Amino acid sequence: MPRANRHFLPDHIWHITHRCHKKEFLLKFSKDRKNWIHWLYEAKKRYGLCVLNYTVTSNHIHLLVKDTKVNTISKAMQLIASRTAQDYNTRKHRKGAFWEDRYHATAIDTQQYLIQCLVYIDMNMVRAGVVQHPEDWPHCGYREIQSPPDRYCIIDQQALMQLSGMNSLDSLRSAQRDWINAELLSKTGKREAIWTESVAVGRENYIKSVQSELGLRANGRRCINNNGKYLLKEPAVSYRIGFDIKMKGLS
């Protein structure tokens, strides 16, 4: 599989996914998922990371953030990933990689696309068959949005409200419940790769603006219409090409 890409365009919403090494279930214990959330909170404090949603599963994480400062995301992810890995390896007397070498970041358009991505993140453990409702999974942003804690808040609900086109926090929470209920009733339960494998997802003009910002880095990337959602996709990489190169080296 190709290495995940990180593009670091300023002032965008990013859906970040990061998997454990070889998809191992290194986050299967609650204490490790809580530890990841602890370092997410520390990253918010230290670097001003604007967090919109998150979910920690047993072998990967989803994180929805707004990029507001230069290198904020890269610094935050470095802190979270390194300290989570260090804490786990120390406790388990383990050596070796904890995470896949790179995380993937997808730029997300505002309002309806942000909402759809938010719901996709909330529904992760429901799709996996672990819980019946997002509120039943303690290591996600759904609970915090619905019932903000008095201390140690991670999600910037004001930013989420504005970016999703809501006029109050109460309307945001009510709408989120409705979105989740509608998704549960639809019973599709399918993983949508567009949110985790694309360079960007949104309106056609948004995708074109991302292409323009990428400049030469957009060469070979295709803008496609996927059931009304426009995507900026990575160029297809032929497995056979890579295999032939390896075989040539062996010969």
Image (spheres, rainbow, N blue to C red):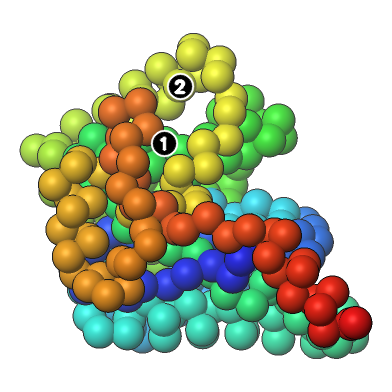
Query: Percent position (x, y) of residue 15?
Result: 40, 56
Query: Percent position (x, y) of residue 154?
Result: 38, 63
Task: Kindly identify the amino acid type of the residue bearing the numbered disc 1.
Answer: Val
Residue 110: in sight, yes or no? Answer: no
Q: Is residue 207 left or right of residue 239?
A: left
Residue that label 1 marks: 119
Residue 242: in sight, yes or no? Answer: yes
At 49% from the left edge and 14% from the top edge, which residue is drawn? 186
Question: Which numbered marker is on residue 183?
Answer: 2
Task: Establish if 18 lies above or below 81.
Answer: above
Residue 155 position by quadrant: bottom left
Residue 249 position by quadrant: bottom right
Q: Quadrant of the N terminus?
A: bottom right
Q: Secondary structure at mark 1?
A: helix
Q: Nearer the viewer, residue 235 or 127?
A: 235
Task: Establish if 77 lies above or below 226.
Answer: below
Q: Is residue 79 left or right of residue 221?
A: right
Count of all numbered marks drawn on residues in the image = 2
Q: Secondary structure at mark 2?
A: helix
Query: Percent position (x, y) of residue 104?
Result: 50, 64
